[in-house]
């Protein structure tokens, strides 16, 4: 737990000043909080990798104010991908396309593609528009957690994870309340004839097929790297065990995560009993972190069934359990 007092602010102009001066600023988005820096500043982007302890071969997502700004980063967008952008931006969708020449190698980890998204959170949107007026055309913003840990969905989570790794004189945390979606964006590769989902999220295969009129293809081993797709990721300190609802022991040292329709043995600490999938998604990371704050040794999670958002929840919990 961090002991340094880092400036948490709600002042978007102060956050813009920090970014312009090559400092880091954690920002709220509707998915999770991101650790933002000017995507054109080698110095600032290097500090993002250092603060997160993120290996250099894991590329970052560039966040822009609107679809009109994407050309600065992606040089070829097929018409079906444009349809996705028009339908879902601003929102929890990331497009990975062929990168333009100006994109730093540090951002793409040397790959010839770059990931871009337009966040919907009003505070992120205000910040990106303010920065645009000051000639900053995009922000890298990986989730604002230490590499491999659970993503943050509020400003306090960022302090807990990165407080010791941000600098007191200049770095900031911009507080925009709790993230409403709670799971990272859906990542779609747009360099092929058909969309390929690199990371499932709240924008679903069905939605993508409906908007593009194209079949969504499975990703293959050769697809670009997605760090959230490493087997072990999103991990709390407690051991996460995936169980059937009738398999949970009545242990006082353990927690439960699942739907509210499930009967939970009375000694388990209920970390999340969600009435629906949206609540499951938005409360999942908070629940994992809460289990650690209580010092529980084990968290029993019952996976939701079905498609759409359930697929994304299963993806994250399966990796948290590895
Ligand atoms: O919802 C989100 O996407 C959040 C918020 C803050 O915007 N950001 C986020 O960033 O989840 P991060 O760095 O934790 O995850 C970004 C993912 C990584 O898995 C990375 O490998 C993948 O995007 N990625 C970035 N650039 C890529 C590229 N060129 N090709 C394939 N995957 C890429
Ligand atoms: Mg992440």
Image (spheres, helix red, strand yellow):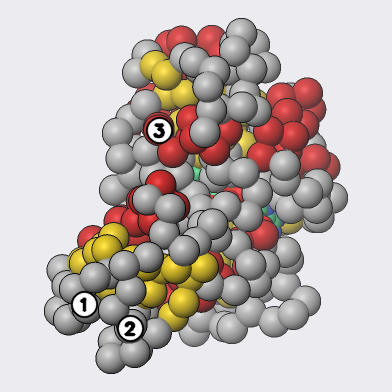
| Label 1 near ligand 2 (CB < 8 Å) | no
Q: Is residue 101 above or below residue 172?
A: below
Is 220 positioned to the left or the right of 194 in the image?
Answer: right
Q: Secondary structure at mark 1?
A: loop
Where does the C terminus fall, quadrant-wise? Answer: bottom right
Residue 169 visible in this rendered orientation of the protein:
yes
Instruction: Determine whether, in the image, residue 202 is placed left or right of residue 220.
Output: left
Residue displayed at 73% across by 29% down: 47
Inter-mark Cα distance, 1 to 2: 8 Å
Residue contact at pointers 1 and 2, CB within 8 angstroms: yes
| C-alpha gap between disc 3 and disc 1 | 29 Å
Res 255 quadrant in image: bottom left
Front in this rendered view, residue 321 or 50: 321
Can you say whether 286 is above or below 138 in the image?
Answer: below
Q: Residue at x 61, y 8 (%)?
A: 169
Place of residue 202 in the rendered image (x, y in percent of width and height, measured from the top left): 37, 64
Q: In the drawing, does residue 231 fall left or right of residue 15?
A: right
**Residue linked to disc 2:** 248
Q: Which residue is mark 3?
A: 156
Residue 264 — which label?
1
Q: Is 238 displayed left or right of 181 in the figure? A: right
């Amino acid at each position: 737990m961090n002991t340094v007092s880092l400036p948490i602010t709600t002042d978007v102009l102060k956050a813009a000043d920090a970014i312009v001066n090559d400092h880091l600023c954690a920002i709220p988005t509707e998915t999770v909080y991101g650790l933002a820096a000017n995507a054109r500043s080698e110095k600032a982007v290097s500090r993002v990798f250092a603060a997160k302890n993120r290996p250099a071969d894991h590329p970052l997502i560039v966040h822009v104010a609107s679809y009109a700004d994407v050309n600065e980063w992606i040089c070829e967008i097929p018409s079906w991908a444009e349809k996705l952008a028009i339908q879902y931006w601003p929102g929890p969708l990331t497009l990975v396309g062929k990168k333009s020449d100006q994109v730093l190698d540090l951002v793409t980890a040397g790959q010839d593609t770059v990931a871009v998204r337009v966040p919907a959170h009003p505070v992120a949107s205000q910040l990106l528009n303010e920065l645009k007026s000051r000639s900053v055309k995009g922000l890298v913003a990986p989730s604002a957690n230490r590499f491999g840990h659970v993503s943050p969905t509020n400003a306090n989570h960022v302090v807990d994870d990165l407080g010791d790794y941000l600098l007191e004189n200049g770095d900031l945390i911009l507080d925009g309340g709790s993230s409403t979606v709670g799971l990272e964006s859906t990542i779609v590769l747009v360099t092929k004839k058909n969309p390929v989902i690199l990371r499932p999220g709240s924008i679903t295969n069905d939605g993508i097929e409906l908007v593009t009129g194209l079949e969504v293809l499975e990703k293959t081993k050769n697809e670009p790297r997605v760090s959230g797709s490493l087997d072990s990721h999103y991990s709390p300190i407690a051991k996460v065990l995936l169980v059937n609802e009738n398999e949970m022991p009545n242990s006082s040292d353990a927690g439960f995560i699942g739907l509210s329709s499930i009967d939970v043995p009375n000694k388990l600490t209920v970390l999340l009993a969600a009435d629906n999938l949206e609540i499951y998604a938005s409360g999942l990371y908070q629940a994992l972190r809460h289990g650690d704050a209580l010092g529980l040794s084990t968290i029993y999670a019952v996976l939701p069934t079905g498609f759409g958002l359930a697929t994304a929840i299963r993806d994250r919990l399966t990796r948290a359990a590895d």
